[in-house]
Amino acid sequence: MHSYIIEDMLKIGYLMRGEIIWNKGSSASPSTAWGSWMSASNLVLRDTHEYILIFSKESFSRRKKDKENTITRDQFLEWTKSVWTFPAVSAKSIGHPAPFPEELPYRLIQLYSFKGDVVLDPFCGSGTTCIAALKSGRYYIGYDIKPEYVELANNRINKYLYQTKVQQIKL
Ligand SMILES: C[S@@+](CC[C@H](N)C(=O)[O-])C[C@H]1O[C@@H](n2cnc3c(N)ncnc32)[C@H](O)[C@@H]1O
């Protein structure tokens, strides 16, 4: 699928920067949809990875005057590698059928945006990107076609904001 998306993005004028393979490893779905069992007749692979496709709009470089980076040296050294390994999160624990772990948008936000930038997630589901944006000192815009997921996202964001406030009062 990812190659079709790349073609479409290039056709509408985006510039491709590269791709990251997210290795979900042992946390990946224990699917048993292997097609034919122990037979070459119609074997189906069970995906334990996802593609993260990175594009720029209009230009590869962004003006950095007055903009603050927040990534640390160790994060930069590790996260600029093209294979990332960390577990997925369970759908049940979040209440959404396909949430991604906060680590995923958090790394991308640290790598590709400056403090105070606005992060847009047009398919924001349970609001994971919005929370990662807040944790990185960015603003966010998130939308989802399903009102119940918008409510779930707002609840998760409010819970995070409440916990942060309580921690600040305790300090
Ligand atoms: C894979 S989920 C995203 C999950 C999210 N990353 C998270 O961590 O919760 C994709 C989301 O896109 C939403 N969606 C599907 N079609 C959409 C559309 N046309 N406009 C906005 N949202 C849409 C779905 O309702 C679903 O919540």
Image (cartoon, grey):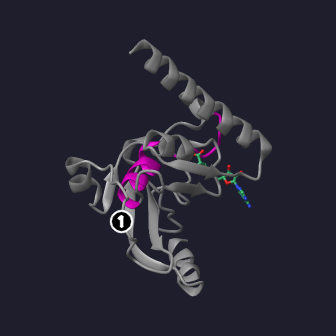
Q: Secondary structure at mark 1?
A: loop
Q: Which sits in the foreground, 80 or 5? A: 80
The quarter of the image holding the N terminus is bottom right
Residue furthest to the front: 66
Residue furthest to the top: 170
Up-down relation of residue 129 to residue 36 (above or below): above
Up-down relation of residue 83 to residue 18 (above or below): above
Q: Position of residue 140 (x, y in %)?
A: 57, 49
Q: Is residue 104 located in the magenta-colored stretch of the structure?
A: yes
Q: Is residue 49 left or right of residue 80?
A: right
Q: Is residue 92 left or right of residue 103?
A: right
Q: Is residue 135 located in the magenta-colored stretch of the structure?
A: no
Residue 70 in view (yes/no): yes
Up-down relation of residue 29 to residue 44 (above or below): above
Q: How many marks?
A: 1
Up-down relation of residue 169 to residue 1 (above or below): above
Residue stretch rendered in magenta on the structure: 95-112
Residue 101 in view (yes/no): no
Q: Position of residue 98 (x, y in %)?
A: 60, 46
Q: Position of residue 40 (x, y in %)?
A: 46, 67
**Residue linked to disc 1:** 65
* Residue plotted at (37% across, 47% down): 25
Q: Is residue 133 left or right of residue 157?
A: left
* Residue plotted at (63% across, 41% down): 126
* Residue plotted at (62% across, 52% down): 141
